[in-house]
Amino acid sequence: MPEHILQLKDITMQFGGVVAVDSLSLYVDEGEIVALIGPNGAGKTTAFNCVTGVYKPTNGQVSYRGKLIVSNHPQGKMKTLYAGSDKDKYTQVLEPTPDKITALGIARTFQNIRLFKTQTVFENVLIAMHLHRTSNLFTATLHLNSKEEKQHHQRALELLEAVNLLDQKDELATSLPYGMQRRLEIARALATKPQLLLLDEPAAGMNPQETDTLSAFILDIKQQFKLSVFLIEHHMDLVMDISDRIYVIDFGKLIAHGTPAEVQDNPDVIRAYLGVEE
Amino acid sequence: MKAFKIILSLLLVASAVALIVFVGGALGNPDDVIARLDADNLAATDSKLQKARDRALESAQAGDREKTLRNIDRYVEGFGDQLELGGQNRLDLFFYRHGPSLIAVSIVVIVAAAALLVSALDSRGRYRKAAIYALLIVLLYAGIYIVENLAGASSMLMTVLKKGAIYALIAVSLNLLNGFTGLFSLGQAGFMLIGAYTYAIFTIATENRAQVYQYYNGGLVQFSLPPLVALVLAGLAAAFFASLVGLPVLRLKSDYLAIATLGFAEIIRAIFQYDGLGPLTNGSNLLRKFATFDSALFPFAVAGVCIALIAMLIHSTYGRAFKAIRDDEVAAEAMGINLFRHKQMAFVISSFFAGVGGALLAMFQTTVQASAFKSSMTYELLLIVVIGGMGSITGSVLASFLFIASSEWWLRFLDNTQMIGDFQVPLLRSGFRMVVFSAIIMVVVLFYRRGIMGDKEFSLKRLSQRFRRKGESRNA
Ligand SMILES: Nc1ncnc2c1ncn2[C@@H]1O[C@H](COP(=O)(O)OP(=O)(O)OP(=O)(O)O)[C@@H](O)[C@H]1O
Ligand SMILES: [Mg+2]
């Protein structure tokens, strides 16, 4: 059996006394679309941030294609504060910065859109090509890398074409309507040549029509760029429509896992979403 | 059209070359003209006239053009009515006096002709931009040269231009950091100091070292380097210190970064005055007698090359990465940009050019003293960057010249008491200039917060577009 493209083992993220993610274990396989859902504040974005290096998890490990990329165990002040489980299970410490994770082939979008606000649509995509430069400071400054620059420009245009933003290429990124900004974030993520794409609420802020076309769009780029997709989303129609598997978390803890049909009928999930007190 | 352009450009070249030949002739033998002025050989009978003539001849033979011009002026002034000042002689004198400017004009004409030729032959317009730039650059430098020859190298205008060019370089280097990378650093004066001292220490002529370092037995360094080598070394020294300081400091968030870099600059200022380092830095005494420049062409050339390099960097993939960091650090990092490495890069490069700028400033002042590199210098530069527009190179350059011109020249009259008839104009007295100057700056910062240029660049394309649009609206 091939290795999982992404695997989380007992990931716990604790902010002071607040346990945002609690011993979360999950995996994504090559070519899958996997959704992570849960009520507001469940810890979904925090889980993404632990994978992408924005946060250092308090405990647990993340592997990419079988290779350990993030690992930590409660240290220092956290030794006494730690409220999760498995505190002695891991000993290794691996804390890469987000750019290292991106370089491995994991790209992401942000729930609260983070485009480069003084830059045009085209420049936003171009910036993401910086990762795959072969020029160094001197050759780039002296413009000896014009061939590569041309390739990057070309590829940026192709990506904008793929997300249907070519007509807006010279507009200021932040002047676009929400839906387009989300697509631009995806184009920018694709420019880093990822194999795994993490989407944090791609439908948020989109109008119903845009949301309708989003399913087809995600399936399309998945096909075209040979991606595996791990996404957070509140629109259940979208999630049920495109996901191969779904993980449900509440208060940081995994409460259900399965195919859309299995999850839909799970009483725990219904309870979490309806907020029924136990 | 094409043939016309080619013929025109060839004609231009021919006339420029002819002019150079003429001028070259006049420049080459001033003694010939001086001798010819006395057509009636009055020198044989008039000893005063002979003395004046011989003085002019002597300086001409010594090859000192400025002195020769002064002596000719005296000669002509004293005995003008007896000398032959018409025809060929007048022309030759004119060529001799304005020769360098005329050669500069000829060079502009030749470059213009070359640009014309390029535009005629290159039908696809691939080299058009380069040709226009080349022409503009040559025009700028020839203009400076001509103005300098007309106004004199030590005139107020040239002083302002020289200092303005130096400040432009340092302001652009600061803008690279504050405006383009979003790192709020206040250490520029410290890096300028390192550059200024490095340059001065390594270019004092060996025979002058005993005198300069009189309290330190002639100092430690006993050789001197060529100015251009020392300039690069000045930049490298500043860059080296920056890379050391950057390691701990660049991990700090913006306000702390400002405080830490400011502290660094103050510490550097103190260290360079420390008596124990005297053999190197001359303690709290002046450094002087190092290599300097006379002509404004030198600072303009160095600053021009450096600013061009910074501009090219900003328009490269690294410049885009810097701007991404400025706009959103988290997003930049998620796009695979290593924050620390790129911040360090911007910091070190900015400091390199601040060091070169500091060295130029030392040359401009002809002496350096560490105590002069106060944090107020950094604030001045920061003001220039803000006035010009954060994230605009042309804005910083423009603002530097405006700032230096107002502070050193245009507002000078406010410091002198003025009388209109019997009435003494109130408020005008020594120190009032600074009051008005501060008020102007406050108004600019309050009401034009985005500065002259915002984050846009001045470009011919935009200018021509604007004119075209105005023309269109007028026609409509
Ligand atoms: N940097 C932080 N410091 C302290 N607490 C944090 C931090 N980031 C997240 N939290 C807390 O962790 C919990 C989970 O937040 P998270 O943003 O992961 O939720 P989410 O599932 O993405 O919610 P939503 O659907 O609203 O986006 C919240 O209670 C939040 O307040
Ligand atoms: Mg979230």
Image (tube, coloured by chain):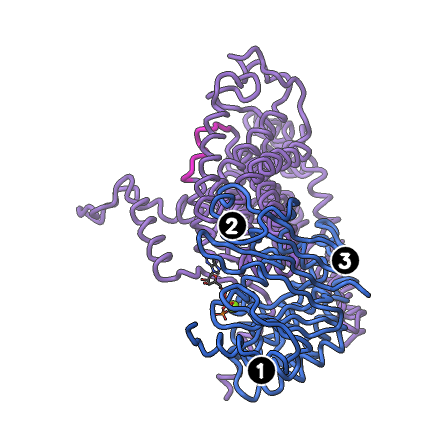
Chain colours: A blue, B purple
Q: Which residue is mark 2?
A: B183
Circle on res. A265: 1
**Label 3 and label 1 in one chain:** yes
Badge 3 residue CB within 8 Å of ligand 2: no
Secondary-structure class at tag 1: loop
Q: Residue at x 52, y 19 (%)?
A: B282
Where residue B396 sits: x, y (%)?
Answer: 51, 53
Q: Which chain does tag 2 point to?
A: B
Label 3, residues with CA under 10 Å away: few <14, some 14-19, many ≥20: some
| Disc 3 versus disc 2: nearer the observer | 2
| Disc 3 with disc 2 on a shared chain | no
Indicate the position of residue B229 as horizontal and vertical percent values.
69, 33
Q: Nearer the viewer, mark 3 or mark 1?
A: 1
Kind of residue indicated by mark 1: Asp
Marks 1 and 2 sit apart, C-alpha to C-alpha, by: 52 Å
**Quadrant assignment for the C terminus of chain A:** bottom left
Q: Residues within 10 Å of mark 2 (few under 14, many from 20)?
A: many
